[in-house]
Amino acid sequence: MPEMVDAYIRYCAEQETPARPQDAPQPGPPTVEEVYEIIVVDMFDTSQVDVKLNPRGGGIAPALVLEGLVPCTPYKPDVAVTVRVLEAFHVLHARAPQLAIQPYVKSLCDLHGHACPACMYKLEGEDELIFNMLTTMDGNDSLKRVLRRHPSDGEGDGEPTLGRSKERVDNRDASDGYYLSRERVDAWVKTRLGEILPTEAHPVRVFNNVFRLLIVYQGEDNPCADRWKNMMWGIFDETGVFLALCRHGFVLVIADMIRSGELAKYPLAVVQELLDVFGMKLGAGYDIGCHFDATVRNSQLGDQARANKLKCLVGSFHGHAHNRLCQLSFLPNYVEGMGLEDLEGCERYFSRSNALAKSCRYASRFHRQQEITTYAKHFDSFETYANLSKFLCTNYRQALTILKTEPALRDWMRQESVESFDEFQQWLLEENEYLVGLKHAAKTNVETLEMEYVQKLVNLSASEAKYTVVQEQARRARADHAAYTPGISKAELARRHAKEKVEKDLESVQSLEVQLDVAERWTAESPKWVSTVVEIKKRKYQLALDALELLIVERIFELTKMNQSQTGYKLRKHIAKALQARSKAVKTAIDNYNSAAGLLDPPMPHLGWEQVVEYAFLADFDILRDTRAEVQSCSWARPAYRLAMDRHFRILRAREEIKRLNVEIPRVVLRRKEQELGDGTGKTEEEAEADRGLALQVRRYRERRGVRATPRPENTQES
């Protein structure tokens, strides 16, 4: 180190001004000890240089420093950084301490012109995939823009009013092919959506991030009615963006959300664009993809979606908040051809793009769009591409790791007498059939007139018993020949109230007897009374289970908003501890559930705190909804068997991932080779020689954008 310090001092002394950047490392004096080959990282380029080492350098590292190069390692360095690059970082960091070394290095990579290859560059003779392309889409409200207005004219109808807009009309377009036009999005107006939103669908639990509650729907109750309503934030014009990405993270389509929340017109317009451009066999992930699938097929896109074999899916994390019946059809782990894709790329993208919020909030419409487009272009070119090779290699390693668990699964199958892997598929079909049947069992979800009748009879019996007691108290008070006291008056008042309550309950009972056509009033020994009491206990059990599930979902999503919940074991434990520390309501709900479960015949399983928070993202709650004892004995309902079934499908998905990667990796490699071989101009050698300036700019543009053009909608026609 002292030798390197001395060399740096001598190097600075040889410069006119120590901090002045040199054009290039200066060669040493004519007397040369040796020539050292090294990669030099300068401010605007990276190149391999043969450096003449000065014999007075005192070793390789000090000799390099004497030439204005700082090696990355003291012995046998392969890479060196110029002094001016390090001095530039020192000055910038001193002025802006938030600038760390990592973003500075990434900036150097950007200046050096690193490009990104296509993720959908089709080749002849490659294997056919179930999904030609996997995409994910979602909305985000961080990139809102305030609409500048004149001061308010006052109040109207007692409510504050907003002033008129004072922004000038600006029709400049900065979309650069990323954006869908407002006109194309507005073609899906809400009046058309009212006719296509399905009213009959399987139950789905959807967490509403605006009202912070869980919506559980079935049949005519539509969960999207609230989610897709126009949430009018009057001070904003653009209230966010709706985004679609390919599975590698390249931006495909952006649509501005205008003075509304996540209306259905945005995903419909995006899907229409994807179908028009990419065509056949698309997989589209969306946090409510289960319900959106029915929406698409009932819309004008239905025929096109069916013809192109569009499959709407639900992301791995969001999907675990849906019920089990939904998961069996839309969760990636159970969908053939998905590989290991989780369809949650939008969440990762938004975690980075949220930093744009400050620069977009008070910008003009044009400059906001320009900011978002510039960020998307840069992210595609210098972030997504930079991590593309890592993405492919990491997925390949992950798939191989999962495949290594197959022998352990086979050992378990031998121990449990499971003959073949086909049984796992059969269990999945049996579970699906069971849940479909359970969905149509309305008695477990709806309070019947018989239940209400029995409850009214119980109320009548209780009021009659109370009236008998109160009447006796009033009689005793009257039998006393003492002088008038207020106590006698209170007893008579209580008797009158008790009599009125009996008459009211009797009227309710008689009204229900007319509706149910009851010829003889039920008693506790009546068969119908006994069967209805059983149904009442089941209903109380279902309500207690629903309340418990609701509280668990609310807490999980609350932690998700703080980016604390993931699917790893340690973080699942973290969620459990946080829930236990903060949620006395959850413990109360567990006690209520256990009380209701104990009243059933046979009793349902008793739940403890650890067992509840370990449930597989709410899927196991659906099994508890059936109170029949034989269901608990089914193979697919037993925890160990369910875990084995999930492991089996995970292995299948790992094989599919390897097959997809074996298709994608040659695409990327060949695209890079084509880029290296061509000059990017499309001209003959004579034409390129005559206009080398234009050829250089075209080549740079192709390096930045051409290799990622395939994921973009307007550039996907080549193959």
Image (cartoon, rainbow, N blue to C red):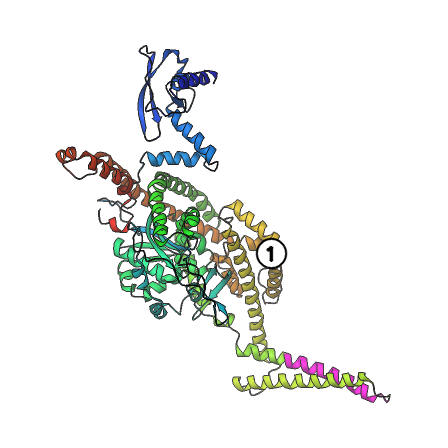
Segment colored magenta: 459-481
Q: Which residue is painted at 52% across and 46% down in the image?
A: 569
- In screen coordinates, is 698 left or right of 157? left
Could you say where residue 613 lies in the image, as x and y percent from the top left?
A: 55, 53
Could you say where residue 420 lies in the image, as x and y percent from the top left?
A: 40, 51
Q: Is residue 173 visible?
A: yes
- In screen coordinates, is 248 left or right of 607? left
Question: Which one is in front, 656 or 374?
Answer: 374
Predominant secondary structure in magenta? helix
Quarter of the image for residue 231 reads bottom left
Question: Which one is in front, 275 or 154?
Answer: 154
Looking at the picture, does residue 245 appear above or below residue 452?
above
| Residue extending farthest right | 482
Badge 1 marks a residue whose secondary structure is: loop
Q: Which residue is painted at 30% across and 57% down in the image?
A: 181
Quarter of the image for residue 192 reads bottom left
Q: Is residue 472 visible?
A: no
Question: Which one is in front, 329 or 507?
Answer: 507
Residue matched to label 1: 583
| Residue extending farthest top | 31
Q: Residues within 10 Å of mark 1 (few under 14, many from 20)?
A: some
Residue 472 drawn in magenta: yes
Could you say where residue 197 lies in the image, as x and y percent from the top left?
A: 37, 67
Give the number of callouts.
1
- In screen coordinates, is 552 left or right of 503? left
The amino acid pointed to by label 1 is Ser
